[in-house]
Amino acid sequence: MSEENIVLAETIAAIKAESDKPAPVEKTVKITEENKEAFFKAFLSDTPYIEKIPLFNGKSNAVFKTLNIEENDVVFKQIQFDQAKGIARSDDSYLIKIIQYRLSGCLVSVDDVLFCEDITVANHVPNKEDGTTYLSERMKVTQKWHTFKLGGITEAFNMFEAKVRELTKEIFKESF
């Protein structure tokens, strides 16, 4: 068999192996009436929307809250501090840092244990000299976790954010 035929056979085998893989499962955001009610109450009372996201089929959980405008502004202040220190200069690292800081600000608890309850926007003034905010201090805690734990919590956070986006879209529907 010629070298060209070997390469062609290997390519066909790789394509066949790839096509035999199951299609990725699309994750749909399920909005319940309870979600709508909690979101509506949070909206009217100008309080964070809070939701417990089950992990491991409910054996574990993570609770997240929405950020207020001040907390969200701190995300970008922290990014500015990072960029001044040479951190988060590329588009990819910039986006990753935004997700990490938002997760650190939105995470309320894991398995009913409060997360960094003593490190809040109210008790940590941004320090331009050190380049720190309450979010960088909270993120230091997540950086000590094992990769798979941070990955799982990040996935739960992404689900929470997707649900908040969907609930926000629901505001304009007559059926809300």
Image (cartoon, rainbow, N blue to C red):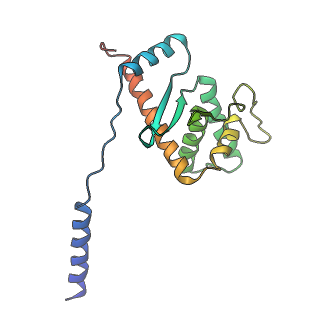
The foreground one among 109 and 31 is: 109
Image label count? 0
Q: Name the residue furthest top.
A: 44
132 on left or right of 58:
right
Q: Quadrant of residue 14?
A: bottom left
Q: Is residue 23 depicted above or below 66 in this figure?
A: below
Give coordinates of residue 162: x percent, y percent.
Answer: 42, 33
33 on left or right of 138:
left
Q: Is residue 109 visible?
A: yes
29 on left or right of 80:
left
Q: Is residue 165 depicted above or below 141 in this figure?
A: above
Q: Is residue 125 depicted above or below 150 in this figure?
A: above
Q: Name the residue furthest right.
A: 129
- Residue drawn at 26 percent across, 63 percent down: 18
Quadrant location, the N terminus: bottom left
The foreground one among 72 and 81 is: 72
Give coordinates of residue 112: x percent, y percent.
Answer: 58, 33
- Residue drawn at 59 percent across, 23 percent down: 69
Q: Can residue 91 be seen in this view?
A: no
Q: Quadrant of residue 11?
A: bottom left
56 on left or right of 1:
right
Give coordinates of residue 113: x percent, y percent.
Answer: 61, 35
- Residue drawn at 65 percent across, 42 percent down: 139
Give coordinates of residue 95: x percent, y percent.
Answer: 53, 44
- Residue drawn at 65 percent across, 31 percent down: 74
Q: Is residue 139 depicted above or below 17 in this figure?
A: above
